[in-house]
Image: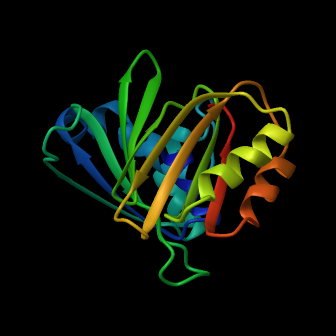
């Protein structure tokens, strides 16, 4: 969950607000949930031996972390909201709502208040864009030209003509050049390619 938040931010985080719900709120210290989320925000893989020292390493690297607990209506019992702002671009932040759903699997259900469905099991493109006619067609045309097969597609928007997000899971692995072609299309605010976790 933390690594996906970092990837969406697109820059090293200098601050992270973590809000824990349900079981996470009650057991995070004993189960190391706080350490795992901080490690992910710092870009560590799930098998990194430094995870247990993540809070200490975060302080050494200047990553300020705030952890609070409470309730999120209707959320899975193991849910966290992770919000890392970008120091180099004031006003740029990502807010991500994700859950640990068992068996080492996660499900990200919300990005910047918009509904998504990201499992981390497939290569995934997360495309923030303006809700405008032809934007989806332009993105999928680039993908078709590259021989990409879409296995799951979801669109969510805040309002007509406002900010929207496409989450596109694809078969196989593709290089960063695909993402770069999407980033320069009209109406695209950002595009992030997540490799399977």
Residue occupying the point 46% across, 23% down: 105
In which quadrant will I find the C terminus? top right
Residue occupying the point 54% across, 43% down: 167
Name the one closer to the observer, 34 or 122.
Answer: 122
The vertical placement of 12 against 70, above or below, is below
Q: Position of residue 67 (x, y in %)?
A: 30, 57
Number of numbered tags placed on the structure image: 0
Horizontal placement of 180 versus 27: left or right? Answer: right
Horizontal placement of 151 versus 118: left or right? Answer: right
Residue occupying the point 58% across, 32% down: 46
Q: Position of residue 30 (x, y in %)?
A: 29, 33
The vertical placement of 141 against 106, above or below, is below
The vertical placement of 111 against 88, above or below, is above
Q: Residue furthest top?
A: 103
Q: Residue furthest bottom?
A: 90
* Quarter assignment of residue 109: top left
Can residue 7 be seen?
no
Q: Position of residue 177 (x, y in %)?
A: 86, 51
Horizontal placement of 103 versus 49: left or right? Answer: left
Q: Residue furthest front?
A: 133
* Quarter assignment of residue 60: bottom right
Color style of the picture: rainbow
Residue occupying the point 54% across, 36% down: 153
Name the one closer to the observer, 131 or 59.
Answer: 131
Can residue 91 be seen?
yes
Q: Position of residue 23 (x, y in %)?
A: 20, 32
Horizontal placement of 150 versus 63: left or right? Answer: right
């Amino acid at each position: 969950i933390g690594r996906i938040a970092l990837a969406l931010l697109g820059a090293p985080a200098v601050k992270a607000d973590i809000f824990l719900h349900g079981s996470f709120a009650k057991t995070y210290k004993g189960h190391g949930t706080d350490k795992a989320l901080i490690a992910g925000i710092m870009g560590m893989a799930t098998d990194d031996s430094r995870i247990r020292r993540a809070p200490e390493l975060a302080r050494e690297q200047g990553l300020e972390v705030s952890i609070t607990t409470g309730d999120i209506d209707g959320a899975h019992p193991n849910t966290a909201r992770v919000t890392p702002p970008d120091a180099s671009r004031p006003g740029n932040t990502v807010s991500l709502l994700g859950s640990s759903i068992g068996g080492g699997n996660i499900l990200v259900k919300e990005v910047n208040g918009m509904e998504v469905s990201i499992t981390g099991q497939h290569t995934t493109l997360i495309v923030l864009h303006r809700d405008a006619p032809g934007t989806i067609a332009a993105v999928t045309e680039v993908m078709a030209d590259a021989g990409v097969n879409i296995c799951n597609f979801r669109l969510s928007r805040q309002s007509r003509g406002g900010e929207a997000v496409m989450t596109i899971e694809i078969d196989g692995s593709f290089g960063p050049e695909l993402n770069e072609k999407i980033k320069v299309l009209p109406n695209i605010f950002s595009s992030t390619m997540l490799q399977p976790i």
